Image: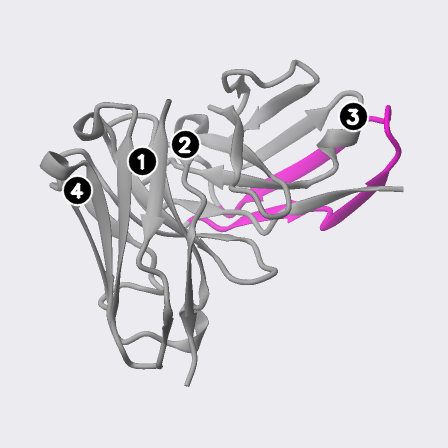
Amino acid sequence: EIVLTQSPGTLSLSPGERATLSCRASQSVSSSHLAWYQQKPGQAPRLLIYGASNRATGIPDRFSGSGSGADFTLTISRLEPEDFSVYYCHQYGSSLLTFGGGTKVEIK
Amino acid sequence: EVQLVESGGDLVQPGRSLRLSCAASGFTFDDYAMHWVRQAPGKGLEWVSGINWNSNSIAYADSVKGRFTVSRDNAKNSLYLQMNSLRAEDTALYYCAKGAVEIVATTLKDWGQGTLVTVSS
């Protein structure tokens, strides 16, 4: 099983600032099969990024993903009020899927 | 529009069984893998199980292996999760999720709103 470790646990930023979220895997993720999800309170997760760097349908271009191997990053270039939320990374490089523990982006 | 509607969640005593269902619509069900993901109250996401398009490939998280069984009925556009020997730590909101492709190793493109399972005496 691939363990995903997200950091930081909480990120305190102001609207308009840049957010950088990290996801580190315990081993290399096959074919960059790494995704990012956003989850707001009381809602199901929403797919943001797949294949490490591909934005899902309808996702604004202020969201970008990068990385390969075992180190991945989600960047939100300029935080909008609706972006304050919890973000999870997720690997699907094998049939045993796993999620990271999440990063909460909160308003400073 | 993809719709996934979970049902079957309930309050159940430890050691008992429960069966969850997920009714799918808005897409060709047997073209895609399907998954169950759970979220304990106030906690993160935990993948539970996945099944490929024709049920030939199935995977489980270690935490539920041997106790939970996933299945699908493509004729009924439905996904199921049979949960046996339930424990307090199985208490969670259980989401049904649609894969992006037909194999189990896929990202989870669409999600239902979840059904709540509470295991308590």
For the rendered model, the colour scheme is: one colour
Q: CA distance from mark 2 to mark 4?
A: 20 Å
The overriding secondary structure of the stretch rendered in magenta is strand
Name the quadrant containing residue A105.
top right
Q: Mark 1, chain letter?
A: B
Which kind of residue does numbered mark 2 sit on?
Answer: Asp
Give the Cα separation between the discs numbered 4 and 3. 41 Å
Numbered badge on residue A58:
none
Question: Residue B19, image x and y in percent?
Answer: 24, 61
Q: Which mark is residue A80?
A: 3
Image-based side of A11 in relation to A89, left or right = right
Instruction: Give coordinates of residue B84: x percent, y percent.
Output: 24, 71
Check residue B110 in the rendering and tell me which mark sits there, or answer none. Answer: 2
Q: Who is closer to the viewer here, B92 or A68?
A: B92
Q: Quadrant of residue B78?
A: top left
Circle 4 marks a residue in which chain? B
Residue drawn at point x = 43 percent, y = 30 percent? A33
Question: Which chain does the numbered disc 3 sit on?
Answer: A
Dot 4 crowding, Cα within 10 Å, few <14, some 14–19, many 20+ = few
Residue at mark 3 to residue at mark 2: CA–CA distance: 24 Å
User: Same chain for marks 3 and 2?
Assistant: no
Neighbour class for label 2 at 10 Å: few (<14), some, many (≥20)?
A: some
Q: Residue at x 72, y 31 (%)?
A: A83
